[in-house]
């Protein structure tokens, strides 16, 4: 029986005898540490191939609540936007999606900017200190006229 041949564990590299019921599909030995490590490795792989799964699940779960969920906690400058207006206009799921989209774009821009800064420290001299915040102005307080009108 070829399935019963010994093979190296994908975690600890020690040779082991695969369980005959699992056969060639068994990649890690029976050591609990190797089983845990293999499971974590597999889950990490799965998350990398399905990056949208948990975000989609969270948005859908938040949409199931009877009343409107609390707005997402977003990093600055996204937290300066009037998310109550977005919830009114686009609903909970639409607003959550926009919030997540903004956060993903912001993180992408920040990581690009960080990499650029390590290449050239002179950038900080050229850019104004609040370059990202000057693009997005908070809604004027009531009494100064409704900017949405
Ligand atoms: Zn092992």
Image (cartoon, helix red, strand yellow):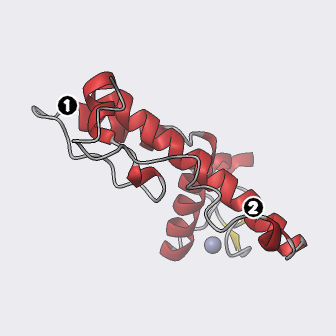
The answer to whether 17 is drawn above or below residue 136 in the figure is below
Residue 99 % position (x, y)? 43, 42
Q: Residue at x 36, y 43 (%)?
A: 139
Q: Nearer the viewer, residue 109 or 129?
A: 129
Mark 2 or mark 1: name the one nearer the start of the chain: 1
Distance from mark 1 CB to nearest ligand 1 atom below 8 Å: no
Residue 8 placement: quadrant: bottom right
- 84 sits left or right of 58 in the view: left
Position in image of residue 130 (x %, y %): 61, 63
Q: Residue furthest left?
A: 66
Residue shown at 76%/64% (left/top)?
127
Q: Is residue 44 left or right of residue 77?
A: right
The quarter of the picture showing ligand 1: bottom right
- The spot of residue 4 in percent (x, y) is 68, 54
68 to 7, vertically: above or below: above
Image-based side of 40 in relation to 27, left or right:
left
Residue 42: x and y in percent read 58, 53
Secondary element type, mark 1: helix
Give me the disc on residue 113. Answer: 2
Q: Name the residue located 39 percent from the left edge and 45 percent from the top edge.
A: 81
Q: Is residue 114 above or below residue 64?
A: below
Q: Is residue 49 above or below residue 29?
A: above
Q: Which one is nearer the viewer's eye here, 121 or 140?
A: 140
Q: Nearer the viewer, residue 116 or 132?
A: 132
Is the residue marked by circle 1 packed among few (<14), some (14-19), or many (20+) residues within 10 Å? few
Which residue is denoted by mark 1 in the rendering?
64
- Observer able to see residue 1: no
């Amino acid at each position: 029986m070829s399935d019963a041949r010994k093979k190296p564990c994908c975690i600890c590299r020690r040779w082991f005898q695969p369980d005959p019921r699992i056969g060639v599909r068994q990649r890690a030995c029976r050591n609990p540490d190797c089983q845990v490590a293999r499971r974590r490795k597999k889950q990490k792989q799965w998350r990398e191939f399905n990056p949208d799964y948990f975000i989609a699940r969270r948005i859908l779960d938040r949409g199931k609540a009877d009343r409107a969920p609390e707005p997402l906690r977003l990093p600055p400058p996204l937290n300066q936007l009037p998310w109550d207006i977005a919830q009114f206009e686009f609903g909970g799921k639409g607003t959550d999606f926009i919030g997540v989209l903004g956060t993903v774009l912001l993180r992408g821009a920040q990581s690009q900017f960080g990499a650029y800064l390590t290449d050239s420290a002179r950038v900080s001299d050229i850019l104004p200190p609040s370059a990202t915040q000057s693009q997005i102005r908070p809604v004027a307080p009531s009494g100064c006229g409704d900017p949405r009108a």
